[in-house]
Image (cartoon, grey):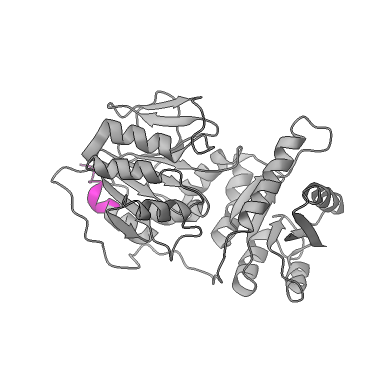
Amino acid sequence: MIKVLIVEDSAVVQQFLVYVLSSDPDIRVIGTTNNGEEALEFLKQEKPDVITMDIHMPRMNGFETTRKVMATHPTPIVIVSGSVQPEEVSTTFRAIEAGALAVVPRPSGLGHPDYERTARTLIQTVKAMSEVKVVRRWRQTPSTVWASPVPDVKKGSDAAEIVAIGASTGGPVALQALLSRLGSDFAAPIVIVQHMTAGFMDGFVQWLAQSSSLPVHVASHGQQAQSGHVFLAPDGFQMRMDSGRRIFLSNDEPENGLRPSVSYLFRSVADTFGKNAVGVLLTGMGKDGAEELKLMRDRGAVTIAQDKDSSVVHGMPGEAIRLGAACHVLPPDRIAAALALLGGRKG
């Protein structure tokens, strides 16, 4: 049985979330609180498996509550957002920085055509996050210096033509740490598949752009992947590349139950760019992209998997390591250092 605490200042929304979550026989709501202060008091007495968190609350908002929970009573936190407007979502991702694992939309009301789908998304996310073993996190100060030595990566005289990255649970913070450490003169285009609940990609891109000196975009069909730009696959589309570094989006079938799929992207990069690519597989549940990272390595690409200690969930990179797909196993800051060496510089 998964025990859940709901942190939400609206009594109506509280009861609605209780109804939605209690509809699943594997979930039991053990408490509701109106703000962060009450939540922290609750955690002194009870130990939920997952916390659902509102952002805008009186006395202590969701950002500060998340930070304090992760510093004192580490618990998987799912942000339940009442808005998918990009500016609002971008702000909400501050809670991901503080240690929350996922952001999902508040389920649509009873009788709404999207009720079943959105309720299922919340329930499935709560179940998945209950399996994540979180650790205590203290306030961190962003830094532009390497936290560890530059890795010994070897590449021919030519810089990589493209960098392909895949990520899932824990990926937003890993991507932020990685991209924020790449200088504005970084030359190779970067294409990314980040598993994310539909509706949040535009806001996620805005959030990433705030800390990156590289331009960050939601990818569009047929556009050129420009040098030194970052492109993320949009909701509900598979993304592949051609030899002219053009991006193609399609409604092809999900792979590993996912669209976009890391496997789909990595396979196209392996087929098109071979040894002239770099592949990176970051934290995430499941195995998406692991076999295709091995394919990239077999074709001569430099391949990197995130290490276990820095991963929120080591499923995807762990499977890649097991398969022998990774030339290097590194934390995000050292991945950025490696990419700085591999991706070349403009001018």
Left or right, 194 with reference to 243 = right
* 141 over 276 or under it: above or below: below
Q: Where is residue 286 in the image (x, y as percent from the top left)?
A: 50, 49
Residue 226 appearing in the image: no
Quadrant including the C terminus: top left
Residue 200 is situated, as x and y percent measured from the top left of the image, at: 59, 41
Determine the image quadrant of residue 97: bottom right
In this view of the protein, which residue sits in the foreground, 288 or 68?
288
Residue 252, how many percent across, how many down? 49, 25
Which residue occupies 27% across, 53% down?
A: 327
Q: Which of 73 and 222 is in front in this view?
A: 73
Residue at screen point 36% across, 41% down: 292
Q: How many labels does the image show?
A: 0
Give the residues drawn in magenta, as a range. Answer: 339-347
Q: Which residue is drawn at 29% across and 51% down?
A: 339
Going by the picture, which residue comes out furthest to the front? 323
Regarding residue 273, the answer to whether it shows in the image is yes
- The vertical placement of 66 against 80, above or below, is below
Residue at position x 54%, y 45% in the image: 204
Q: Residue furthest left?
A: 157
